[in-house]
Amino acid sequence: MVRAESSKLVKPLYQGEPPSADLCIPLSVFDKITYNLHVELIYAFRPPTPSNSDIEKGLATALSEYREWAGRLREDARGEPVILLNDAGIRFVEATSDDALGRNVLEPSRFIVAWGLATRGLPMDPLPLHGRGAFFIPRNPPRVEFEHRGVEFTAKNAFDTEEDVPLTTDLARGLDEHVASTVHISVNGRARLRPSVPDEYFGNLVLWACPRAKVGELVKRPLQSIAEVIREGIAKMDDRYFRSLIDFASSKEVKEGLKGTIEAKEAAFSPNFEVNSWVRFPFWDLDFGSGKPFSFMPSFYAVEGIMFLVASPTGDGSIDVYVTLFSHNLDSFKQLCYLLD
């Protein structure tokens, strides 16, 4: 059991004169089409740990460079979503628990690493890049080379559950061989755009590759063949595709009534599946002053059909895989995992 001891808003702590609190940052196209949700993560450290007051002060210092976290979502005069950098603060909760922790994993971010550096009194390096508009300027004239309607965008009030599905999960679900399923794989656009976008860019830059096949075909194919289909799907998400989406997002069709398909989701993706790669996240870099975390884990994720790939804490190059499934599918999934060559 976890007991909340206190809850407060922590605001940015500036060394000099605070910046303007009425600046609005427009969301980029990639911000608009990604998930609108919070992902809860847990880090665990061995004692002795810094005091909660030191961690709180470090958070306030980190927020001075990552002001978006302390801001609020608003709409501008045109009805477009923006982040108001009003320094309203971020929720900081102190809680206790007597439960034992096992070893799991979670997604760290550059902000979390910066928080640790600030808590230790060290400079935050590298600093985030905030210029959302500078990287995603539509071409003139626009060149929409791919079909984005129904993929990244759909008509308002429409519903689309096209997602991704690995072979083992399909079998564990007991799906009919004629059912078509899609592996929806997150693709980071930073290195795919030309010129590339620096890793320090503070914003969303992810699209989704969507290889698709019938369950019966997946069962009959060797794993190597299935992997090749997935690799081909990811390879198509290149600079041309990302630039095409940027141009399409600025078009009249989008402005007049299309929205991101990723907004329309249920709590279950079956017969499809989603794959998120957290392999490159620097989770070992988080240090509040007492050393690296000994355990990290995602909190409860109330969506069926999602896979997280994470570099193993052992540091030997292996990858840990975390899958969200309904409880009645777990036994079949465990058995099938040991049947894979």
Image (tube, rainbow, N blue to C red):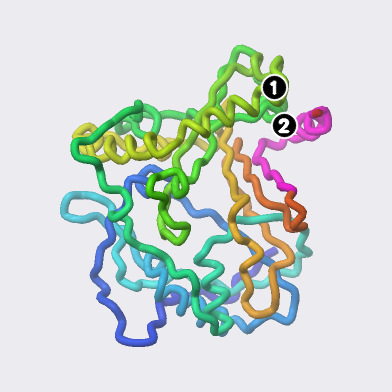
Q: Say whether residue 319 is magenta.
A: yes
Mark 1 lies on a secondary structure that is loop
List x then y, in percent, for residue 283: 63, 61
Q: Which residue is mark 1?
A: 174
List x then y, in percent, for residue 145: 32, 28
Q: Residue at x 23, y 35 (%)?
A: 142
Circle 2 packing at 10 Å, graded few (<14), some (14-19), many (20+), is some
CA distance separating discs 2 and 1? 8 Å
The C terminus - image quarter: top right
Task: Tell which circle, 2 or 1, labels the residue nearer the N-terminal end.
Answer: 1
From the viewer's side, name the closer residue of 182 and 41.
182
Q: Please say if 60 is above or below 163.
A: below
List x then y, in percent, for residue 120: 58, 82
List x then y, in percent, for residue 124: 49, 75
Check disc 1 and give the amino acid type: Gly
Q: Say whether residue 331 is magenta.
A: yes
Q: Which residue is mark 2?
A: 329
The magenta region covers 318-340
Mark 2 lies on a secondary structure that is helix
| 183 sits to left or right of 138 | right
Q: Please say if 69 is above or below 33.
A: below
Circle 1 packing at 10 Å, graded few (<14), some (14-19), many (20+), is few
Q: Quadrant of residue 172?
A: top right
Residue 296 seen from this side = yes
Q: Residue at x 63, y 73 (%)?
A: 287
Check disc 2 and give the amino acid type: Asn
Q: Are marks 2 and 1 in contact (CB under 8 Å)?
A: yes
Residue 56 seen from this side = no
| 164 sits to left or right of 49 | left
Residue at the outermost top position: 178
Q: Residue at x 59, y 56 (%)?
A: 281
